[in-house]
Image (cartoon, grey):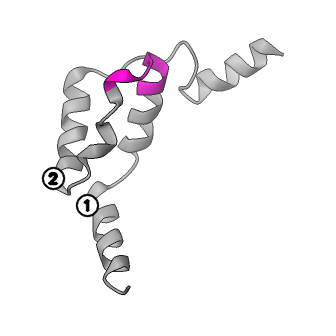
Amino acid sequence: MAAAVENTLTKLSLGSNAAEPSPEAVADLKAKFELVGQGHVFTFYDDLSVSEKAALFKQLSSMDPQRISVSYYHYNAHF
């Protein structure tokens, strides 16, 4: 059972085999989020394990911070 869980986590980039993103890739991604005032999502990045860093990087890489920021401000402008 443990092997099946580890296999699933590895496929999701959450397992122990996950590779830490390069400092350059993290800096580039962080800059994109900082441009729209969302740099705080990296506040505790350095405190994460390698697999957690890989998972967060993968999740954030799939997002468009500009679109998220515009959507957030558009939504809040109506309240």
Label 1 Cα neighbours within 10 Å, binned few <14 / some 14-19 / many ≥20: some
31 to 22, vertically: above or below: below
Which secondary structure lies at badge 1? helix
63 to 3, vertically: above or below: below
> Which numbered circle lies on residue 66?
1
Magenta part, dominant SS: helix
Range of magenta residues = 46-53
What percent of the width, then of the height, locates residue 31?
Answer: 17, 42
Residue 68 is a magenta residue: no
Q: Quadrant of residue 3?
A: top right
Farthest residue to the bottom: give it.
78
Q: Residue at position x 78%, y 14% from top?
A: 2
Say what amino acid the circle numbered 2 marks: Leu
For the residue pair 37 and 12, the one nearer the viewer reads as 37
Which secondary structure lies at badge 2? helix
Q: Are marks 1 and 2 in contact (CB under 8 Å)?
A: yes
Mark 2 lies on residue? 35
